[in-house]
Each structure stands twice: as structure tokens, then as C-alpha cells.
Image (cartoon, rainbow, N blue to C red):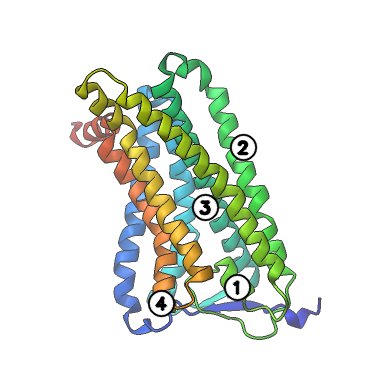
Amino acid sequence: MPLHHLPSFFILLGIPGLEAVHGWLSIPFCTMYAIAILGNFTILLIVRMEPSLHVPMYYFLCMLAVTDLVLSTSTLPKMLSIFWFSSREISFSACFTQQFFINCSSVMEAGICVALALDRYVAICDPLRHSTILTNSVVAKIGLAALLRSGLLVLPFPFLAWRWPYCRTNVIPHTYCEHISVVKLACADIRISNYYGFLVTFLVNVPDVSFITFSYTQILRAIFSLPTKEARIKTFGTCSSHICVLLAFYVPSLFSFFTHRFGHNVPLNFHILTANMYLLVPPMLNPIIYGVRTKQIQGRLLQLFTRT
């Protein structure tokens, strides 16, 4: 491929049409990022310090926290530099590196959501065998499998995008190097990139959502078969935080995916805001949801702040 077909850098415009309010938009974005960083590091610290939390659910929660930190840090610093300093340039290699970490973290988060659903399914539907089924080695293998799946599925994205000639423009109307926004700049037939994007979405979302739906259907059946109302409420409370996490991840991610490919009448600035919410809202909400809903984390956090 001729070298002149590979630009040395891309230019990220931020949110086209809203340049005048970039400074104001940076306030909620920066706030969400700060909450995500503080919240997820707090989860990691509390689980590390509290031996009673060294169980599968909290190991999966730590994996989710690390993934959220990578996901938000892959995008927010560059986004804020655009909003605050008009630093719009991003090198060609940095753009594809950012693209890889964003996509890899998203697929990894989906895998961890499946692992959390599995943990709740075993804990509620087969509680006597929970400790023998989800041993530490099994938890480690599940985490490794989720990591390998995300890496293997996502790795072709930057390689496919790298091979296209970019001879039209190097201006990306976005706040980060979203895969489809980058390959649309290529002066070539990019159908293979589009097809592979649909394939990955299918391979990730269809089996994951199917398993999660099956798991929570069985969980709800087990809950409603309990003899007393108090037992049903207590048991439902143990998995309600997981349901909130699943909704926080899947609703904005699927909305962003379908809007980008089929919402041709959706204004560009609204589309970009939605894409940013998909990367910012779950990392911010996950530690809040678990912090509010989980008494063990609440208690350990109170001990940290009230210790004299």
C-alpha cells in the first residue's frame, strides 16, 4: 500500500455542531469519569482488604472494575483534551490502539456480565454446590476465557481498518476513534469491515443475551417458588444489582449500535453523545449500583471512613 494512503494522524472534531459548548459539556463528562475512577478503584481496594469478599461474585466484580477503568480511560482523557485545549490530533497508530482497547473492553464487559449471571444462577438455583462449582480456579478460567474471546474477536478490527487507503480526508467527526467512523473515511470498499462488525455483534450479543435471559428466567422461577414473601424479597435483592448492571450496559450499547447503522435520520451530535454515554455511563454506574445494593461493601466502606 502506498505510504501516502496512510495519514500520519487523524483529526477528532469532538461533537460537530456543539463546538461552542464543548467547555460546558466537559463538566458532566469529567464528573462521570472522576466517579468511574474513584468508584472502581474503591471497589478493588475494598475487595482486596476484606477477606470475606474473596468469593466468586466479588472476583467477577473486580474484573468488571478493571474493565471499566480501561474502557473509560481509553476515551475520556483524549476527549477532555479536545474540549479543554482543542487538541484534536491523534496519531494513526494511537487511533487504532484506542479503537482496539475500546472494542476489547466492551466485549470483555459483556463476558463478565455473563459470568455474573452464572454466579447468581448457581447461588440461587443450586446454592449447596456453589462453592464446589465456582472454585477459584474456575473463576480464573472464566476470566481468562472472557479476555481471550475479546482479544481474538477484536484483533481483526484494527488490522482490517489498517489495510484501507485513507486518501479522502483524515477528519473524524467524533470524540474518539470509533471503528465505523474511521473506516468510513477510507476510499475503498469497506464492506468486509462492516460485515465483520455485524458478525462480532452477533457472536457476542446473541449467545450472551440468550444465556443471561435463561439464567434470570430460572432465577425468577426459583425466587417465586420460595415459601414466604420475606424470603422472595431478600433473594430478589441479592440479584437486583446484577440486573441493574446488565441494563446499564446493554441498553445504551445496543441503542448506540443500531442508531449508528440504521438511524440515518438521527442528528450527528445526538448520535455522538449517545456513543459517549455508552462508554461512560456503565463504568460510572457499576460501582454505584454495587456500592448501594451490597451491604458487605457498604459496611467495609463505612469502616474505612469512620476508623479513628
Percent across and percent down for residue 192 are 71, 66
Quadrant of res 79: bottom left
Q: Count neighbours of disc 1 (C-alpha within 10 A) and say few if under 14, some if 14 to 19, many if 20 or more.
A: many
CA distance separating discs 2 and 3: 15 Å
Q: How far apart are labels 4 and 2 at the CA level?
A: 37 Å
> Hey, which residue is sitting farthest right in the picture?
1
Q: Secondary structure at mark 2?
A: helix
Alpha carbons under labels 4 and 1: distance apart = 17 Å
At 29% from the left edge and 20% from the top edge, which residue is drawn? Answer: 226
Q: Are marks 2 and 1 in contact (CB under 8 Å)?
A: no
The residue drawn where x is 36% and y is 22% is: 52
The CA span between labels 1 and 3 is 18 Å
Residue 163, percent from left and from top: 75, 70
Mark 1 residue element: helix
Q: Which residue is mark 1?
A: 182
Q: Residues within 10 Å of mark 2 (few under 14, many from 20)?
A: some
Q: Mark 4 — residue?
A: 269
> In the displayed structure, would residue 126 be above or below residue 181?
above
Pointer 4 or 2: first along the chain: 2
